[in-house]
Every structure is written in C-alpha cells, then in structure tokens.
Image (cartoon, rainbow, N blue to C red):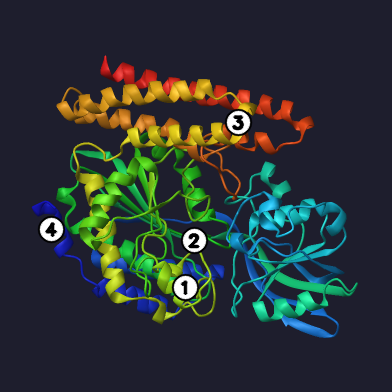
Amino acid sequence: MTPDEETVLSSITLEEPWSLVETFSTMHRWMPEDVNKGADEIIGRLQRLGIPHSVYEPDIYLSVPLSASVEIDGQSFRAKPPSMSLPVPDGVTGELVYLGANVKNLRNYTRDAADLFAEGAGNLAERLKGRILLTEGFGNPALTSIAEEAGALGLIVINPGQNIHWGTCTTIWGTPGLSDLARKPKIPVLAVNNPDGKALIEMAGSGQSVTMRSDLLEGWFTQKIPVVQIDGTEDPDRFVLVHGHYDSWEVGVGDNATGDATMLELARVLSDHRGKLRRSVRIAWWPGHSTGRYAGSTWYADAFAMDIENNCVASVNCDSPGCRWATSYHKTTCMSEMKAHVTSVIEEIAGQTPDWIRPKRAGDHSFYNIGLPTYFSLSSTMPDDLRAEKDYYEVSGCGGNIAWHTEDDTLEIADRDVLLTDIRIYTLAVLRHAALPVLPMDWRATAAEFADTIDTYRVAAGDGADLTAAHDATQRLAQILDKAYAAIDSGGLDPARANDLLVRISRVLVPVNFARQSRFMQDPAYVCPPLPMLAIAKDMSNLPADQIGFAKTELIRGQNQYVAALTQTRQMIEEALS
C-alpha cells in the first residue's frame, strides 16, 4: 500500500456512515414518496459535507406491492405479491396444482424448466393450463414466465422459511419500452411462507379451487437520483462509476442502507482527497431497484449512454456490505479482467484471498450491454459453515442473513466492524482504479476465461458442434494481448494510449460475454451463460434429432458473431501497437 493510499484509508471513520444507517433504520423507503424522502436525506448530508453533486428527477415506471392473500377451503393465508405481478384485487380462482421444485435451484434464474422442477419439465402446458401452479422457491422472472407460457392462471411460490420475501417477477429490465410490454407478467404471482405452503401442498391435487387476491400500485413516478462527481486532476472526463440503490423493502438496513452509507463515506473521503485522483469518481444512488426492476440505474444508462460509452472505465456496485456475520469474501462478484485488481485489495484489507462468482443478471448491473468492466455487487458474506450451522437458506443480499427482503431487515442486521472493513475495501479499490497511471484491467484473464468456456462447450457438444473457428480466434486474441501488455509494461505504449485501448476493448468483450441484446439495449432478467452466442453448443448432445439442424444454424451465426468481435478487438490492438 502506498503512502497516499494509507493516508486516504486512515481518514475513514464510521461517524457519517453509521449515522445514515441509524437514520435509514427508521425510514420506510419503498412507497414512491418515501423513497424521495430517503433521497432528501442523502442530499442533505452531501450538502452539509460540501460534496459536489447533482440531483436528477426522472419519471420511471414502478410497481409497488400493497396487499395479497390466498384463499382455499374457507381458509385465508397471508401472502405478498412480487413487484410487476398482475394485480387481481377481485381475485382469480382456479384448481391448485403442485409441482415440486428442485430445491437445489431455489435461487436459480434459469429459463430451463427441467432445472426448476424435481420431476423435470414434463408437459407443463397439459398440467398447468387453466390452473394455478404451486411450487417452492421465489417469485422470480424465469419461473413466472414459464408458468405464464404454460397457460397457468397464476403462480404461488412457497418461500423456504418463516418469513415471506418481497421481490420482483418481471423479465423486463427497467422501465419498459413499447417492445418490452409483451413480456410484462399477465398472471398474478404470490409468495407464501413455508408453513402455509406446506398446508397448501396438502390441499393441492384434490380438485379444490384456490383464489388469489392482490393489489399493487403501478404507474409513472418522479424519483430522485443523487449523483456525486469528484473530478480527477489529470483525466477528469474518464470516471469510475460507483452505484447502489437507496430504495428498500420497508427500512432495509442490510439491503441497502449499509451500501448507501458506504457510498456516502466514499464520497466524503475521496472528496477530501481529490488531489490524489488522476481520473474522476462518480457515485450514484438509485431508486426503483425492486419496484422498478432497476429502473433508476437503467434510466441513467439510457440518459447518459454516450457519456458512459466514451468515458466510463468501470462499474462498481455497492449492495449489502457491512452486514452481521458477513466476514467472508468467498462469493465476490467480479469479471475476469478485474480479478487481479480486486484480489490485491481484499488481501490487503481483509487478509483473505477471494473466491469468485460470475456477475449475475441481477442487482443494478444495468451497464453490461454498454460494456463496462464490473466488480462487486455482494462483497462480504457469511461463511458457509456458519450459514449451515444456522440452517439458513441462500438469499441474494444482507450478507447471507435471511432477513433479506423482509420486515426483519432492521438495525441489528448491520455490523459496525464489518461495515468499516467493507468501506475500506471499496475505498481502496476505487481509489486505485482512479489513481493508477494505467487502468487495472487485464484482458488476458478474460481471453483465458473465453478459452475455458469454449473448451467446456466443445466437450459438452461432443461431435455435435464444431467450435474450431471460435477456438482459433481466441488463441489469436490471447497472443496479441500478450504483446499489448508487454508494450504497456515496457513503456512502449504510454499510459494515455494504453488506457484508451483498454477501454475500447471493454466495449467489445464485455457484451460478448454478458449480453444477448445489442449495445444500449437491456437483456431480460434471467441467466446469461458465458459467451451466450455459443452456449447452444453445450445443449447439442441432449437435443431431439428434429432440432439439431436448427441448433447448428443458431451456432453458426453465433460463432460468426464471436469471431467477428474478437477480430475487431485484435485489429484495435494491432493499430495501437503500430
């Protein structure tokens, strides 16, 4: 760690961040007017601290759950409707059909029904048409769309524990465009807790009718987006984007008051030490995270697309740091090109070598299609042995605490010591990203990941697919990347030209690995496999004979897209080295 880094880290305190956590622990932040009050709290603190900032007030489309119930055989069960499910205040009635879930995949956002149900996909349309599906899990977008496509009248999901978790069930990312509206859920979706779910399972299959009722507040709402801009001294147009949501379910301390507090302290510390930044840091607090399926960050990606395209060097998400018992970094979100950078930071601050998870199509990661190198979302989490000891099921935030997305996500979910560690990790990572002469992204690691993915797909496909062209293009890219980094290390490529090249590479290689849709569009909110244009290859050996020709056609087109993207990248590098 350099003396400058030590100076910056030594100035971190918990005074401001813990004060915000305590304040937010008393403020509901899910109704639109309350969300704006949360923004005003952040804005007031920025003003008091003298931190330069802007406030945007876009109109975004939100769906706010209000009330719900499940009624069967004279009994009424408490329920919650996920955001964006179809409101049915007058009720929808149908026969209840239970399909047991593959419990290993409760958090799975896959679109593969065979992965979701213990009995496999079966003939879903025959079993579900005109009926109401009951299954274990969460009311996620993939499960909702599968049930709807099978002709189900509705979906009831049984959450794993005593609490019912709020969530969202649309595959639409952000405020819909006209072409997205067809994917807005057309069926009601409700979540019940595990004890009530077991009672419903006992009643299912006997031909009894169940009535689902729900009410949601939907429409366009003006929401505030505070954004801090801390200008760098040498290359102020370039910036690192740090971001997280400030709206929450009820008071949402672990998700995401602790993240809001982390970003506030990051803004305070880096503003005080702005002279140590070569390039700028931009910090944004988003509304519409759950009730708008990331509508705040998506609005920003749309409204500032060209600025992001031309100048943003990385996306750093801040969601659920500083939570109780979250002392491990074995599920750290990071793209391959950023792993060396993030590893060094976590090793120095926490004394641990992180293990990785591939960034998911979740959180406020609304910048994949534009092509931003990305790290963090969930940083610290509970050790697996402690989670097993507590008999906790897997959730997507709160450091592994199952208070996630429930009324129990209150002040005791935050931990001062863990929060301080996570603030130090975020600060050092962002400081280095903004201060190093050459941006800390290593595309050789990404090329190695591509090679491993292609080898995995080739093995899975057997003789059913020829990925030679993709393999060879990857090898050629790896070779030219070795030359590029040798030139950077030797000074043959000066930092300004090197940084320009590294950013331009990201605009090609990140979408190749994380997006199906074109740049400046938004992919649906379900799993995107590595190198999605080649992913059909892994399914070749399991496809029916009458589908093989269509799959090969899809793969040929996808491989052409992949080879063209890598050829474009190689040519950019060759031009920079000439």
Which dot, 4 or 1, sits closer to the camera?
Answer: 1
Query: Dividing the image into 4 quarters, which one contains the C terminus?
Result: top left
Splitting the image into 4 quarters, where does residue 434 fall?
top left
Residue sitting at x 52%, y 66% = 395
The residue pinned by badge 2 equals 287
Residue sitting at x 76%, y 56% = 147
| Pointer 3 or 2: first along the chain | 2
Q: Is 167 positioned to the left or the right of 255 in the image? A: right
Q: Residues within 10 Å of mark 3 (few under 14, many from 20)?
A: few
Residue type beneath disc 2 = Pro
Q: Is 458 positioned to the left or the right of 82 in the image? A: left
Residue type beneath disc 1 = Ala
Q: Which mark is residue 462?
A: 3
The residue pinned by badge 4 equals 6
The residue pinned by badge 1 equals 388
With respect to residue 369, does 489 lie above or below?
A: above
Q: CA distance from mark 2 to mark 1?
A: 33 Å
Pointer 2 with pointer 1, Cβ within 8 A = no
The secondary element bearing badge 4 is classed as helix
Task: Name the residue furthest bottom.
Answer: 74
Q: Nearer the viewer, residue 301 or 161?
A: 161
Which dot, 2 or 4, sits closer to the camera?
Answer: 4
Which dot, 2 or 1, sits closer to the camera?
Answer: 1
Residue 497: x percent and y percent? Answer: 25, 26
Pointer 3 with pointer 1, Cβ within 8 A = no
| Pointer 3 or 1: first along the chain | 1
| Pointer 2 or 4: first along the chain | 4
Residue type beneath disc 3 = Gly
Task: Name the residue furthest top.
Answer: 578
| Pointer 3 or 4: first along the chain | 4
The secondary element bearing badge 3 is classed as helix
User: How many marks are shown on the rendered structure?
Assistant: 4
